[in-house]
Amino acid sequence: MGRGASILIFFFVVCVSLGFSQVSLAAAPQLTRTEPKPASAEPSSPEKTAQEGPAPQSQTSEQTKTEQYTLSQERYEKAVAYSRADYTLYFVSYFLVGLFLFLLLRLGVAAKFRDIAENVSEKKWVQGMVFVPLLFLTIDALDLPISVYWHALSLRYEQSIQSWGSWFWDWAKGEFVVMVLAIPVVLVLFTLMRRSPRRWWLYAWVPAVLFELGLIVITPMVIDPLFNRFEPLSKEHPGLVASIETLTKRAGVPIPPERMFLMLASQKTNAINAYVTGLGASKRVVIWDTTIQKTTKDEALFIVGHELGHYVLGHVWKGFLLGAAGLLLALYLAFRGLHWALDHWARDWKIYGPEDWASLAVLLLLLHVLLFFSSPIISGVSRTEEHAADVYGLEVIHGLIPNSAEVAAHAFQVLGELDLSDPNPPAFITFWLYSHPPLGDRLVFAHRYDPWSKGESPKYVK
């Protein structure tokens, strides 16, 4: 999807749910992985250990392959190059989108779009339906080269296998979906701004929270199928369905077979993943077909156990409540920031006041900046929740799967190899971007976590 309407939609989604509307093992590619260990000198050995930097690894007969996250020489070099390019592109793209928004204001483009909308009709809702697509599609068209380069990068490093035709079709569908969502959001927001210039930020909070709740419910049933094919998991994998049923019952969140789905991710990506999503009637377990193809059945069950942990431990609702509070603060800051910006530059930008359609570009710029600087907080909360889900996943499969710790550790190893997890990212990158704990740390923890042999009580699954 492009960045225009996405900024507004993503702002509500992130602030309300803190990223837990759909929880997954892998989360966003590249920005959720590996540990901030300092690099050391280049080794002569072709195998490198991500846990200790690129130093030669010597394994004893007692060590198993998955005590540490390791990569071959070739995969190591690709992981470093790919991740560094990904990090750079993330920050560059954030800067460029902010620059685009600023130029649309400074050059009077947003004001020109307002004039066009007002010339079409005197009715505010008609003006909004003209202005919103004009502004958002312009931003997304400016952002398109960045998105194209991002996909080219994923193709070059064999993360994606999606053809350009398929990719552009997904981009177009994404534009349509976000526009359908954004237009009513903007119409409601500006109606409140006109009726209550001083309190709109407070009144907008309730519909924003309700909007996010509705989005969580409808996404699995309406939006996800637009971009990927889903079929009942029982169709080709009845044995796995039975095992997942046992796992969900032990977790206390039984999910019937008809709510277990296989996503045909192999048509577009080489990555592996699984997730639990939705609320109420839309709650479901989804496993990518790549996960089944590239991991063992026991490893897939650990991945599902991790996802179940988010629900059992209440991460979705805790994140929702925390995010709702953050959203209220963010709306107030947007209100204050909008008045401050218009006091300084309204004449230069040809904006008449906060209720002017052109002021939406100012709000988007403010929200864009706010999301950027709130990233470390969102990432930090998410890392804490993901670690707890790792612990739960290890505990819920213990006793059901032989050598469960090794199974979990090897699942992380496979994930790292396929995702080209960066062995030595800068500490700043981990702090700012990683929504999951460093992958190497997760692997080591999974291999060593064993309260049972120490006579200790498990933390979650008694």
Image (cartoon, helix red, strand yellow):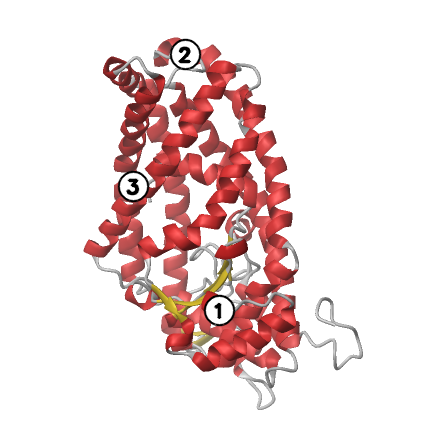
**Looking at this view, is 323 or 140 the one in front?**
323
Q: Which residue is drawn at 37% across and 78% down?
A: 236
**Mark 1 lies on residue:** 54
* Image location (x, y in percent) of residue 409: 56, 75
Mark drawn on residue 346: 2
Looking at the image, residue 307 lies above or below residue 172: below
Disc number lying in front (2 or 1): 2
Q: How many labels does the image show?
A: 3
Which of pointers 3 and 1 lies earlier in the amino acid sequence?
A: 1
Disc 1 is placed on an element classified as: loop
Q: Determine the image quadrant of residue 202.
A: top right
Which of pointers 2 and 1 lies earlier in the amino acid sequence?
A: 1
Furthest residue toward left: 165
* Image location (x, y in percent) of residue 243: 53, 79
Q: Which residue is drawn at 41% across and 79% down?
A: 237
Instruction: Verify CB contact (< 8 Å) between mark 3 and mark 1.
Output: no
Left or right of 67, for residue 97 = left
Q: Residues within 10 Å of mark 3 (few under 14, many from 20)?
A: some
Q: Residues within 10 Å of mark 2 (few under 14, many from 20)?
A: some
Instruction: Verify CB contact (< 8 Å) between mark 2 and mark 3.
Output: no
